[in-house]
């Protein structure tokens, strides 16, 4: 008998499912607690009417179950207990085991919907922390949880999955508005990737408000603040880059934590997911906050009555630590979100019309540990010099430090930001469609070569499909939770395809295939 079963991420064992222990490091008891929490959220959705309090509770609970977000059983147990209290007594009986659903297509669609909801939940939580909530998002999450629990119809689940894509678009638009109203529109910015000579704090995850509050509280502390992985885009926001002690970005994508957190020397703040099993080399100087958690790691509590979080403990620790060890030198350029790209519209249109730009390739999404992900580096290198790479998410670390040059002064890698900023890339594409007076966005000289890892990427994929984008390449593997028939439906309806070799895919993309 399986000790656990989980196939929600791209690195799931043998691309079928983790049954002994998660590749991510998740233990069976943690997996069971997450399964129980999802089960309880379904019951809660079936027995209560959504309101802002319950809606926020449910999305934060879903967020806790995303890959590499929370490994702390005590916090999961506390969340489960609260969910049970909110539900109250009920005679409704539901299965807790994914594999209890014997129809592989129904099971596949239920899980596709569930993982899309988890991605939506992460983005909705970030927006809520900035004061932006949308009742329609909460209402959909409730209805989707109920459908997952009750529906025996494949067609109904297909409909819910398509609706999930539309709600993902709505959620990412809400977060985009929340970020830009709070921190300003991203600007083209050159970011230092070298280490300084003062003690520092390394901030990883995705939460920009946590970073802002930390910057404010540490402005006179004699220390520097560095971003890591998905926090890199913070440097492009006017309200964050104004802090002179926001020194630069240290390191690469999330899966390099073991080496980079050790060499940083100072304290690390994990604001959301992408924490991996904590190593002894930095165990005594890592903190979590928000929905992130790890057993034995100090957790900085949530805000109370609208007051900022208290980051004094991590700031005081930083003052006692040596500066980070240098791991690289140089600079990278970021800040190509939709408003900044719109300001370059005339240059871009002229470059396309003159033939200087032949094609745009969206290489956004997630990075991961597998060696096969070198495909994205090799693909970036092999793309002809008349192509522009549009990127967002930590997948960028496979190629954002390559010297790929410019086209008429336009960098060949345009980095829009975090994974949620794939929305920005979609907005840019839709604007180009309008500019070139095309009937269909798929008529643009635009190809998608997306890397995925976890559930936010599932939400982004469903959002892109909802917006009408077709012929998306997805790698390094298609999701294990897609049954053959559901995968074929996505292939037939939307042209979804897996990756091949860089040589084959570059040739096909340049030919518009």
Image (cartoon, rainbow, N blue to C red):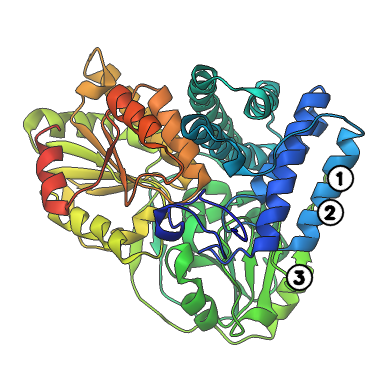
Quadrant of the image occupied by residue 123: top right
Dots 3, 1 in contact, CB < 8 A: no
- Badge 2, how many Cα within 10 Å: few under 14, some, many 20+? few
Where is 469 relative to 209, above or below? above
In this view, 389 is above or below 400: above
Q: Are marks 1 and 2 in contact (CB under 8 Å)?
A: yes
Q: Residue at x 63, y 38 (%)?
A: 121
SS state under label 1: helix
Residue 124: x %, y % from top left: 63, 36
Q: Residue at x 83, y 44 (%)?
A: 306
- The residue positioned 53% from the left and 55% from the top of the image is 241
**Image location of residue 178, percent across then percent down:** 61, 35
Where is residue 334? Give x, y as percent.
38, 52
Which residue is identified by label 1? 82
Say which quadrant the N terminus sits in: bottom right
* First in residue order: circle 3 vs circle 2: 2
Residue occupied by mark 2: 78
- Residue 50, located in which quarter of the rendered image? top right
- Between residues 272 and 164, which one lies in front from this camera angle? 164
The quarter of the rendered structure image containing the C terminus is top left
Answer yes or no: do the residues labelled 3 and 2 have beta carbons within 8 Å? Answer: no
Up-down relation of residue 319 to residue 502 (above or below): below
Residue 441 image point, x, y percent: 28, 21
Circle nearer the viewer, 3 or 2: 2
Q: CA distance from mark 3 to mark 2?
A: 16 Å
Residue at mark 3 to residue at mark 1: CA–CA distance: 22 Å
């Amino acid at each position: 008998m399986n000790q656990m079963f989980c196939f929600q991420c791209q690195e799931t064992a043998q691309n079928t499912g983790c049954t002994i222990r998660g590749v991510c490091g998740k233990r069976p008891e943690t997996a069971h607690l997450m399964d129980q929490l999802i089960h309880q959220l379904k019951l809660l959705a079936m027995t209560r009417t959504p309101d802002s309090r319950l809606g926020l509770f449910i999305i934060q609970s879903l967020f806790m179950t995303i890959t590499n977000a929370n490994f702390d059983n005590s916090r999961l147990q506390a969340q489960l207990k609260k969910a049970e209290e909110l539900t109250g007594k009920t005679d409704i009986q539901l299965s807790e085991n994914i594999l209890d659903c014997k129809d592989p297509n129904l099971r596949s669609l239920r899980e596709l919907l569930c993982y899309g909801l988890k991605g939506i939940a992460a983005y909705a939580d970030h927006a809520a922390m900035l004061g932006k909530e949308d009742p329609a998002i909460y209402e959909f999450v409730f209805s989707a949880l109920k459908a997952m629990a009750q529906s025996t119809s494949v067609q109904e689940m297909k409909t819910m999955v398509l609706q999930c894509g539309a709600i993902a678009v709505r959620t990412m638009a809400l977060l985009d508005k929340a970020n830009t109203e709070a921190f300003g529109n991203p600007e083209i910015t050159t970011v230092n990737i070298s280490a300084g000579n003062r003690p520092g704090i390394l901030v990883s995850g995705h939460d920009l408000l946590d970073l802002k509050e930390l910057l404010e509280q540490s402005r006179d502390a004699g220390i520097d603040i560095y971003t890591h992985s998905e926090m890199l885009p913070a440097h492009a926001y006017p309200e964050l880059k104004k802090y002179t002690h926001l020194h630069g970005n240290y390191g690469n994508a999330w899966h390099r934590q073991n080496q980079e957190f050790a060499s940083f020397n100072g304290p690390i703040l994990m604001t959301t997911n992408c924490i991996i099993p904590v190593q002894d080399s930095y165990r005594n100087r890592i903190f979590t906050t928000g929905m992130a958690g790890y057993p034995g790691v100090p957790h900085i509590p949530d805000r109370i009555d609208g007051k900022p979080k208290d980051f004094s403990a991590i700031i005081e620790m930083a003052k006692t630590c040596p500066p980070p060890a240098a791991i690289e030198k140089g600079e990278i350029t970021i800040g190509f979100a939709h408003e900044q790209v719109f300001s370059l519209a005339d240059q871009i249109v002229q470059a396309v019309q003159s033939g200087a730009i032949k094609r745009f390739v969206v290489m956004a999404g997630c990075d991961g540990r597998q060696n096969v992900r070198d495909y994205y580096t090799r693909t970036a290198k092999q793309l002809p010099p008349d192509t522009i790479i549009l990127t967002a998410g930590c997948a960028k670390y496979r190629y954002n430090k390559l010297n790929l040059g410019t086209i008429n002064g336009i960098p060949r890698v345009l980095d829009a930001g975090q994974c949620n900023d794939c929305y920005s890339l979609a907005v840019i594409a839709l604007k180009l469609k309008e500019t070139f007076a095309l009937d269909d966005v798929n008529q643009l000289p635009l190809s998608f070569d997306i890397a995925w890892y976890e559930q936010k990427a599932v939400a982004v994929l469903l959002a892109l499909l909802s917006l009408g984008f077709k012929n998306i390449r997805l790698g390094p593997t298609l999701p294990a939770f897609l049954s053959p028939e559901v995968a074929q439906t996505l292939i037939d309806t939307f042209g979804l395809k897996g990756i091949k070799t860089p040589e084959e895919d570059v040739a096909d993309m340049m030919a518009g295939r």
